[in-house]
Image (cartoon, rainbow, N blue to C red):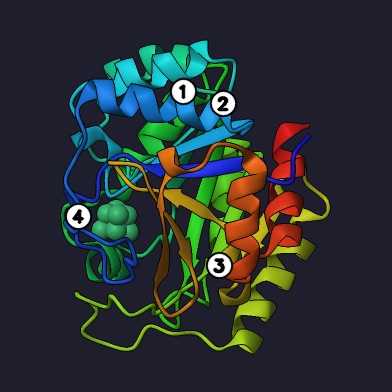
Amino acid sequence: MGRLIGVCFLVTTKCNLRCEFCYAPLNSYKNNELSGYLRIIDKIKSLGFLKITFSGGEPFLVDGLLDILRHARKQNIKVALTSNGMMIAREDVDELGKCLDEMTLPVDTLKQDRLVYLRTSMFSIHKTFELIESFLLTPVKLDVSTVVTRFNSDECEDIFYKINHFGIKKWKISQYSRFDVKKYAAFDLSIDDISFNLFTDFAKNLAHKSSLIVHHRNNKSINSFINILPLGDVLVGTGNGYINLGNIFHYSTQDHLVDELEKCGFDFHAHRSRHVLDLC
Ligand code: SF4
């Protein structure tokens, strides 16, 4: 196994929502064409990656998303998808079940007034729970993600019991990160390290007696993600923004990419520890 395991392929930076805590570079980059997406998948595979997480923006805004997922699956690479879920019809779930190994849906708060505030009125937690029930009938491994801000840090227990009741296997908890692209947040959502650690410790304690695995990503480990933009540029987060390492087609081997990542302080240890469990 090489030093690098997985990439996040941001197939679009367009989104149907405008979440207050979003740090994706929304609308900053053009979409690719179907053939371009497929070539990038082949390149990711040839560099020795074992897993692609398709995300965005909202991946369902890309025409031909299912063809893209099917192509990745045929490359014998682990295929994961992160979506806000609002564009997924229940009838799509069976087909997605044939293309995906993993799916991640967001549950940030159970309180409707906070939901509208954090994710806009276009987000429905009821639809998310319906989707969770549908995906649980497929072979897809379903994960739930929560962005912890100062506005939902009191909901650890409620969210735990809700998702544990569904039988979710992995809870991905992220510390809200300001980055430098704070386009929508009208208020400061940041949560200090101590409060975030209290949330994750509490979550791990609650999960201890269940089969739920808790993964957390704090602001220090943000530089352990390799993001690929729609046209193939490689971005690494720094906590204050992103470093662009040029186009993926510029890299002939994984070692070549590793050299560049080393120069920008990439956290290889956090990258591997997050992914090694994924691949078990
Ligand atoms: S759904 Fe995700 S990408 Fe879209 S605005 Fe919300 S956080 Fe950003």
Quadrant containing ligand 1: bottom left
State the mark number for residue 42: 1
User: Is ligand 1 closer than 8 angstroms to the Cβ of mark 4?
Assistant: yes
**Contact? badges 4 and 1 (CB < 8 Å):** no
Mark positioned earlier in the residue sequence (4 or 1): 4
Give the CA separation, mark 4 to mark 1: 30 Å
- The amino acid type found where label 4 is placed reads Leu
Q: Is residue 102 visible?
A: no
Q: Is residue 257 above or below residue 130?
A: below
Mark 2 burial class by Cα count in 10 Å: few <14, some 14-19, many 20+: some
User: Is ligand 1 closer than 8 angstroms to the Cβ of mark 3?
Assistant: no
State the mark number for residue 17: 4
Mark positioned earlier in the residue sequence (2 or 3): 2
- The amino acid type found where label 2 is placed reads Ser
Give the CA separation, mark 3 to mark 4: 22 Å
Q: Tally the numbered discs.
A: 4
Identify the residue under disc 3: 222
Mark positioned earlier in the residue sequence (4 or 2): 4
- Please tell me whether mark 4 sits on a helix, a strand or a loop: loop
Q: Which sits in the foreground, 110 or 100?
A: 100
- The amino acid type found where label 3 is placed reads Ile
- The amino acid type found where label 1 is placed reads Asp
Give the CA separation, mark 2 to mark 3: 25 Å
Q: Is residue 220 above or below residue 233?
A: below
Q: Quadrant of residue 249?
A: top left
Q: Which sits in the foreground, 27 or 152?
A: 27
Of labels 4 and 1, the one closer to you:
1
Give the CA separation, mark 3 to mark 1: 26 Å
Identify the residue under disc 2: 46
Of labels 3 and 4, the one closer to you:
3
